[in-house]
Amino acid sequence: MEKKKLYKTEGPYKMVCGVCGGIAEHFEIDPTLVRVGCVVAIFFSFSAGFWLYLVCALLLPIKSDVYPGY
């Protein structure tokens, strides 16, 4: 069994940078739940959620780099 890798989504599943879509695909959950959780984290964690999202947006590769052919 191949190990799953974390990445940013691209295409129609991408909203801002594709971070939430990639996390949702990795954990096989609805992307809307991840996006709502991200917004809640940004508003209630004194901006730590924003910085975490920004770091992920800068460091995570896009899906086509991780899985060529997508």
Image (spheres, rainbow, N blue to C red):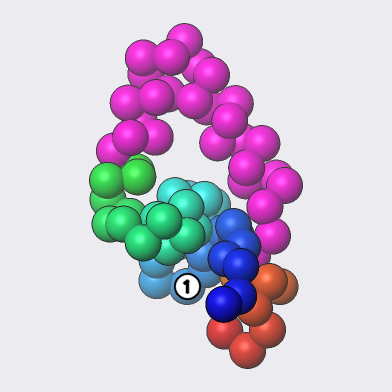
In the image, is 34 to the left or to the right of 65?
A: left
Tell me where residue 52 sits by quadrant: top right
In the image, is 58 to the left or to the right of 42?
A: right
The x and y percentages for residue 47 are 50, 16
55 in magenta: yes
The x and y percentages for residue 38 are 39, 34
Tell me where residue 39 sits by quadrant: top left
Quarter of the figure with the C terminus:
bottom right
Residue name at image x 29 percent, y 38 percent: 36
Magenta range:
36-62
Query: Which residue ends up furthest to the front in the rendered image?
Result: 1
For label 1, the residue is 11
Residue name at image x 52 percent, y 64 percent: 9
Q: Nearer the viewer, residue 3 or 44?
A: 3
Q: Is residue 25 above or below residue 66?
A: above
Query: Which residue ends up furthest to the bottom in the rendered image?
Result: 69
Q: Nearer the viewer, residue 36 or 30?
A: 30
In the image, is 17 to the left or to the right of 68?
A: left
Amino acid at dot 1: Gly
Q: Is residue 35 visible?
A: yes
Residue name at image x 70 percent, y 45 percent: 58
The x and y percentages for residue 22 are 49, 58
Q: Is residue 16 above or below residue 62?
A: above
**SS for dot 1:** helix
Q: Is residue 21 visible?
A: no
Q: Is residue 11 above or below residue 46?
A: below
* Dominant secondary structure (helix, strand or loop) of the stretch shown in magenta: helix
The x and y percentages for residue 35 are 34, 43
Q: Nearer the viewer, residue 37 or 12?
A: 37
